[in-house]
Amino acid sequence: MIYDTLAHAGQYAGIHPNLARGLRFLAEADLAGLPVGRVDIDGDEVFALIQEYTTKHPADAVPEAHRVYADIQYLVRGEELMGVAPLETMARELEARPENDIRFYEGETIKFPLGGENFTVLFPGDAHAPCIALGQPAPVRKCVVKVKL
C-alpha cells in the first residue's frame, strides 16, 4: 500500500509502467469534469472509474481485494475513511467474483482518511474497505484507476 499526496506521485513511477501511467492520469486529467463511468487510459491495462456515491456507515464496510489489478484511489470531492489490512489477516473469504477481479472478506482493518490531495495505491495483497463515512454519510466523487500488474 502507498498513501501519499499527488505532489509526490512521481516518485512511485518506477515501480511499474502501468502505475506510472495511472499516476500521470491523476495528475493531468480534469477529474471534476469527466463523466461518471469508465475512462480508458490504455485499454484494459490502465483505466479509470469515475464514481459518485454516498459514503456508508462503518458497520457496513466489507473488505475487498483484487488479484489482477492494483487500485489507485483518489477523492475528487469529499472525504471518506479507507480501511486496509494485509490480505492474509482476513478471517475468511465471503464471496469471489473473479470475472470482475474482486473478492470480499471478513476481517478487521485499520482506517485512515482519504481526501484532499491524498491518494492511496492498493496492491493485490492489500485488503481494503473503501467508502466509509467520516462522521455522517456524505456524497463524494472518486476516481479509481485500475492498474494491471
Image: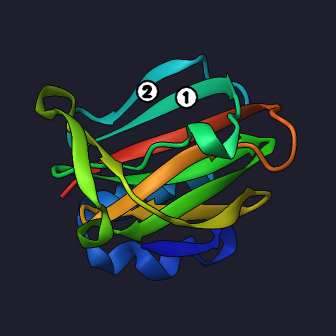
Q: Secondary structure at mark 1?
A: strand
- Which label's residue is closer to the chain start, 2 or 1? 2
Numbered circle sitting on residue 39? 2
- Horizontal side, residue 76 vs residue 59: left or right: right
**Most foreground residue, 33 or 109:** 109
Query: In the rendered view, would you say 35 is above or below 75?
Result: above
Helix, strand or loop for disc 2: strand
Residue, disc 1: 50
Give residue 110's quadrant in the image: bottom right
Residue 98: % across, % down: 12, 34
Give the class, few, some or many, for how many residues have Cα within 10 Å of label 2's Cα (few <14, many ≥20): some
In the image, residue 58 lies at what x, y percent? 66, 46
The quarter in which the C terminus is drawn is: bottom left
Name the amino acid type tagged 2: Val
Taking the spot 43% from the left edge, 77% from the top edge, the residue there is 12
Left or right side of 143 for 80:
right
Vertical order, 111 against 49 (above or below): below
Residue 59 appears at what percent x and percent y?
Answer: 62, 43
The location of residue 70, given as percent across then percent down, is 31, 55
